[in-house]
Image (cartoon, rainbow, N blue to C red):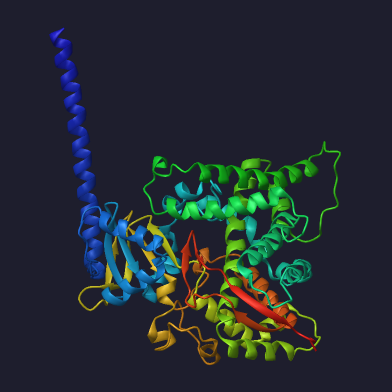
């Protein structure tokens, strides 16, 4: 018996010793490799954001939640950049997190060193119950596969067909009061973009703008909106589900996914060789139908749809709300915009004509600049890498970034740098775009590099077309919100907490 104990102890001791040797060897190798990178590039650390808890950063985490609750998340981050410089670092849940709005660093993260950075370790846990793995939440081969599937959906030939938009915009216009009474455009824009997005991606509109819309459609929109707010909270928490004991979130996930699954089931059924239900499919590219050609996996199709539906829906809905939020507070901008649009007369509204309306494009650029739908975004280093600038006493030295370190950028703060946009960068002033040509990586409302938002042109076209139709329909716009300043509400992106409460007077003629 004693011999067996001795043998067991010897084996365990040997295993422990071997494991320690391997650990020391690996640690030494990592240290040597990182030291060589530091020396080769002349890396120096950036400034530290002052923290009471320098190990886990719990004080800053609590502060972030307070800023979200106080509707000042984007504003507070800009204040930190104004105070501590364009690149600095902190500790968050015990991990190093860098913050930067230096254009060379953004170019490195999003483009030139794209393969060094990812999102899956940051996003998948938070998003998975709601939209699952897909183009928004994965890296590597799964991301490349998803990106390849959705890319044809947003080809110019698909987006330039404005007749599908027009049907829904007409229904939208019918819901705006003609008696100069107050209307909040935000929920109407959400329904408009919901209808256009579902038709564009699913091949069939949800018809939420119709007076006889179904209870299922209303339930989906309510569940979707709540789910987005809850996902925003999950992204701020560690990866522990017990911290998100919110039955409404899980119910919202079930409701939203079940609703979209109905579209998937119908597409799978009509494409089945054994199906008696044969529909004449549209000739245009519809994402759902193409996904069905690639796989019969119902859950995979559902995840891919929801991953692209989220950005396709939110970007345009938020942008439209913010455009009219500002036009209602700037009567002279409304007059200039209306003068340009009415000069078109009765000419057909085409993709090319929308692009040629210079003041309209200035209004949109200024809105995306001043109120980007995604105020901040974060990447995680998938391997050891280097940022080109922001380190050392002058902020000009490269910065070493270890595997697992994170980098957050604030498009909200980036778009208000006075070096690029002038001393009045905090103001909403479309006229600045008459001569402004921002240098690369100083205006990135839709991201950049391989992960640039695939629905960018769809959102811009849908936004421009809707603005033109509204301006043609109404002569004046009046602000009806007693709160003049923009109050942010954070979910995954940033939207107006108070919506866009306005009143219109009807135009007597278009031409």
- Give the residue drawn at x 80%, y 81%: 348
Q: Nearer the viewer, residue 376 or 391?
A: 376
Residue 82 visible: yes
For residue 402, side relative to residue 160 (left or right): left
Query: What is the x, y in percent for residue 244?
Result: 43, 44
Quadrant in the picture for residue 167: bottom right
Give the residue furthest to the top. Answer: 1
Q: Check the picture and name the quadrant holding the N terminus.
A: top left
For residue 476, side relative to residue 254 (left or right): right
Query: What is the x, y in percent for residue 211?
Result: 77, 59
For residue 89, side relative to residue 256 (left or right): left
Quadrant in the picture for residue 19: top left
- Give the residue drawn at x 41%, y 76%: 414
Q: In the rendered picture of this protein, how many numbered marks are placed on residues?
A: 0
Residue 139 visible: no
- Give the residue drawn at x 52%, y 76%: 482
Query: What is the x, y in percent for residue 266?
Result: 76, 44
Q: Nearer the viewer, residue 193 or 245?
A: 245
Query: What is the x, y in percent for residue 100?
Result: 35, 70
* 171, above or below 216, in the image: below
Q: Nearer the viewer, residue 458 or 238?
A: 238
For residue 84, side relative to residue 329 (left or right): left
* 171, above or below 419, in the image: above
- Give the residue drawn at x 38%, y 75%: 104
Q: Check the picture and name the quadrant holding the C terminus.
A: bottom right
């Amino acid at each position: 018996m004693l011999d067996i104990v001795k043998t067991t102890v010897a084996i365990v001791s040997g295993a422990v010793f071997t494991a320690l040797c391997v650990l020391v060897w690996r640690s030494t190798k990592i240290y040597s490799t990182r030291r060589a990178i530091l020396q080769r590039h002349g890396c120096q650390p950036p400034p530290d954001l002052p923290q009471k808890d320098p190990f886990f950063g719990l004080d800053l985490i609590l502060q972030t939640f307070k800023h979200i609750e106080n509707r000042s998340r984007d504003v507070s981050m800009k204040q930190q950049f104004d105070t501590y410089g364009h690149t600095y670092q902190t500790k968050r849940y015990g991990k190093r997190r860098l913050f930067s709005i230096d254009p060379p660093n953004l170019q490195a993260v999003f483009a030139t060193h794209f393969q060094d950075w990812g999102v899956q370790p940051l996003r998948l846990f938070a998003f998975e119950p709601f939209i699952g793995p897909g183009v928004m939440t994965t890296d590597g081969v799964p991301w490349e596969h998803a990106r390849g599937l959705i890319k044809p959906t947003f080809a110019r030939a698909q987006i330039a067909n404005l007749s599908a938009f027009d049907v829904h915009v007409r229904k939208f216009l019918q819901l705006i009061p003609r008696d100069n009474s107050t209307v909040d455009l935000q929920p109407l824009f959400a329904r408009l973009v919901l209808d256009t997005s579902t038709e564009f991606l699913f091949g069939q509109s949800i018809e939420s703008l119709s007076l006889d819309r179904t209870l299922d459609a209303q339930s989906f929109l309510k569940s979707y909106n709540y789910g987005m707010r809850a996902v925003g909270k999950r992204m701020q928490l560690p990866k522990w589900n017990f911290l998100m004991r919110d039955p409404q979130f899980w119910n919202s996930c079930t409701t939203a996914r079940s609703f979209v699954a109905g579209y998937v089931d119908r597409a799978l059924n009509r494409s089945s060789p054994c199906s008696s239900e044969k529909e004449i499919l549209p000739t245009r590219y519809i994402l759902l139908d193409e996904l069905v050609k690639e796989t019969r996996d119902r859950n995979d199709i559902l995840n891919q749809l929801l991953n692209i539906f989220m950005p396709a829906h939110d970007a345009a809905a938020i942008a439209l709300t913010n455009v009219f939020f500002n036009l209602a507070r700037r009567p002279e901008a409304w007059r200039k915009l209306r003068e340009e649009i009415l000069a078109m007369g009765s000419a057909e509204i085409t993709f090319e004509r929308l692009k040629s309306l210079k003041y309209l494009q200035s209004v949109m650029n200024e809105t995306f600049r001043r109120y980007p739908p995604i105020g901040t975004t974060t990447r995680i280093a998938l391997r050891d890498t280097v940022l080109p600038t922001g380190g050392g006493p002058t902020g000009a030295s490269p910065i070493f970034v270890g595997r697992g370190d994170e980098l957050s950028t604030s498009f909200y703060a980036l778009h208000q740098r006075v070096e690029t946009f002038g001393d009045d960068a905090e103001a909403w002033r479309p006229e600045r775009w008459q001569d402004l040509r921002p240098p690369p990586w100083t205006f990135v409302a839709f991201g950049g590099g391989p992960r640039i938002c695939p629905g960018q042109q769809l959102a811009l076209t849908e936004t421009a077309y809707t603005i033109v139709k509204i301006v043609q329909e109404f002569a004046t716009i009046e602000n009806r919100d007693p709160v003049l300043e923009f109050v942010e509400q954070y979910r995954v992106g940033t939207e107006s907490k108070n919506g866009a409460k306005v009143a219109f007077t009807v135009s007597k003629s278009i031409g």
